Amino acid sequence: MFLLLAQVTAEDVSREIARLQRNYEFLSYGLIVAWVILALYVLMMVGRERRLKREIASLKAMLEDKQPR
Amino acid sequence: MKEKLAYLMGAIAIALFARNIYVISGLPQEVNQGAIFKIIFFHAPMAITAMYCSCVALFGSVMFLITKNFKYDALAVAVTEVGLGFLLANLVTGSIWARVIWGVWWAWDVRLTSALVCWLLYAGYLMLRRAIEEPTQRATFAAVFSIFAFLDVPLVYFSIRLFRTQHPGPVFFSSEGSFPKDWSAIFALNMLALTLLAAVMTIVRLGQENAQREIDSLRRTAHAI
């Protein structure tokens, strides 16, 4: 065990730390991107909802104006 | 009633996500892959959710062709759009995982390519809908196209079982797979949360399709006056 530890250099340790950090970095990128895609889709839906409501209201108003009194 | 149900499902999904993210962050690292392995808790459920969506789209399309009822067409388009979002998130998370494990962002193996083709086919479905003005013709052509696009889904699912791919082999429903039991429970809960989220999105999108139909009918009335 002691012999094995003696073979580990400071360079090995720093390389392992860098690998772990890179691993976490990419994991966070993955999760962030996934949620950003879904959040953008939700925002797109909210925008579409508003546009549809506006369009319905304006069409109804137009039809009321066109109705013979 | 439908809105209340959607709110309830959304609240359950958010609570489940909060719990799952807390539990997943506390899990130990996988021996060979390290922390990046944890991406599977989102990557795979997103793919499965997208697959559910394509199955519902197939049902909606077939039912529209049989009954000519537009509510099935609305269901097909709503669920296709939601599924497309989940499949995109699945492709991106997979690509990020591949960059760490394989050293490349993308590999043209059967699983990845068939999933990309699937995404392109369903994106084509939405583009086709925009290109046709007449509602009945639009719904009929789109339904036929959706059934055609679904042919790619079994290929995506079975690709890792039928071919030697760079993509890892099946973990679930396979004798080769090995996934700890307690991890499977977390995976299943995340799967449930994503399915609930997809259902909420579909309900909202269905409401928008109904609003669009109302607009079409109001426009027809306005033209007639």
Image (cartoon, coloured by chain):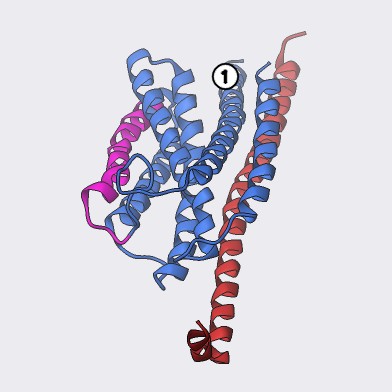
Chain colours: A red, B blue
**Which sits in the foreground, A61 or A16?**
A16
Q: Nearer the viewer, residue A28 or B130?
A: A28
Residue interval drawn in magenta? B138-166
Q: Quadrant of the C terminus of chain B?
A: top right
Q: Which residue type carries mark 1?
A: Ser
In the rendered image, residue B171 lying in the magenta stretch gets the answer no
Residue drawn at 42 percent across, 45 percent down: B123
B3 lies left or right of B150? right
Overall secondary structure of the magenta stretch? helix
Question: In the displayed structure, would residue A51 be above or below residue B63?
Answer: below
Quadrant including the N terminus of chain B: top right
Task: Say whether residue B138 is visible.
Answer: no
- Residue B66 x %, y %: 33, 15
Residue bearing mark 1:
B217
| Figure quadrant of residue A14 | bottom right
Which quarter of the figure has residue B122? Answer: top left
Horizontal and vertical percent for residue B107?
34, 65
Name the chain under label 1: B
Where residue B75 sits in the image (x, y, percent)? Answer: 48, 25
Q: Residues within 10 Å of mark 1 (few under 14, many from 20)?
A: few
